[in-house]
Image (cartoon, rainbow, N blue to C red):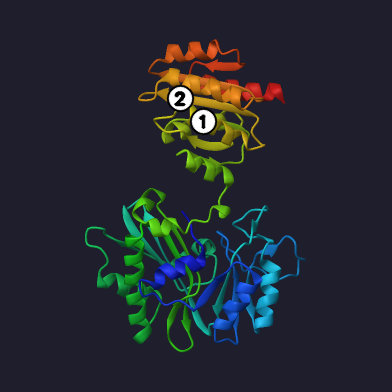
Amino acid sequence: MNIHEYQAKELLAKYGVGVPTGYAALTVEEAVEAAKKLPGPLYVVKAQIHAGGRGKGKFKELGPDAKGGVRLAKSIDDVKADAEDMLGNTLVTVQTGDAGKQVNRLYVTDGVDIAEEYYLSMLVDRATGRIALIVSTEGGMDIEEVAHSTPEKITTITIDPASGFQPHHGRAVAFALKLQGDLNKQAQKLAKQLYEAFLALDCEMLEINPLVETKDGNLLVLDTKMSFDGNAMFRHPDVAELRDVTEEDPAEVEASEYDLAYIKLDGNIGCMVNGAGLAMATMDIIKLNGAFPANFLDVGGGATTEKVTAAFKIILSDPAVEGILVNIFGGIMKCDIIADGIVAAAKEVNLQVPLVVRLEGTNVEKGKEILANSGLPIVPADDLGDAAQKIVAEVKKAA
């Protein structure tokens, strides 16, 4: 689960992390009132979308010379003009794709006199089973480009979960940032605060870019992104309330309501599978046969007719889908129950695209019989290879 920048800063502030004063705004009037609460004379108006590259982004509705999604304003009138420009318009960045994202929220903050910019992030390093701190003196830049061009400027520090954050981790962060004196001490303290927040909130990723040194000698978090382990949100109802579903794919939001694991992809073959590993294998074999999967969809181990029907509707909500492959291994979930669900779903959604079904496992013969007697043009498959070949052939035939 992702949250907005202003929400992330509010969470970090609770752990003592220094952030510039700022206020969220949903309307132009709220943006103006936010600016009036700040000392000025310099303000920063930021578009709030779940994507990076906002400063260099472009608004679809504005001309090519228009400013991006992060703007410096030198007066309250400038704040008003910027808010009018951004709210309701579509911001396209390197991370949104060509479709962009509509800006529905702004964040108006106090201006900061910047002396230096740094990069600092934390993530779960699955290779080591530890939390990793990624530190660089090259703040404000695309960290992927830094890693590619000057990897020596990036330092990775891993923290053993058994011992947790230790003073030497803080010193390593300060050393990597080449800070001395009071700034060195601030960096050590900040690293500890960030680790505590990361652990306590069940974060998956916490990125600060840039972390800035102000001209009066303080470290401040100027921009930040936070994402959380969705499976841990039951422990954090206050964080779960920060979810902004307007920033998510509508199909993925609907899928979550039925406890379906769904991710939209760019292909034309819809997939409905039980089990993440089997779903990955299904997508791979579709591609091996010359087509591309339109989605990852795991219905889980206890799919009901309602769940299967919802899965079909979600798959078909993607206009790019030209055929559907159902690949089910019945263990706890019996094949005849799945077959009933497939038939009911196909009838309810008035299925108009080819459907290939491969069933295996508990009550498989009953399941195949239900599909054969359904009166629907369902193409049965004997195994995964056969299923992939058949759905690709059916789609080509229908084209």
Name the quadrant of the C terminus.
top right
* Separation (CA) of disc 1 from disc 2: 8 Å
Residue 351: x %, y % from top left: 63, 25
Residue depicted at 69% across the width and 64% down the height: 58
Front-most of residues 179 and 326: 326
Q: Could you tell me which secondary element the residue under label 2 belongs to? A: strand
Whether residue 161 is visible: yes
Tell me, yes or no, whether the two marked residues, 1 and 2, touch with CB atoms within 8 Å.
yes
Q: Residue 328, which numbered label?
A: 2
Extreme-bottom residue of the structure: 216
Residue 293, can we see it?
no
Label number found at residue 272: 1
275 shown above or below 174: above
Q: Picture coordinates of residue 152 (x, y %)?
A: 44, 67
> Which residue is painted at 44% across and 70% down in the image?
10
Is 200 rendered above or below residue 216?
A: above
Dividing the picture into quarters, in which one does residue 268 lie?
A: top right
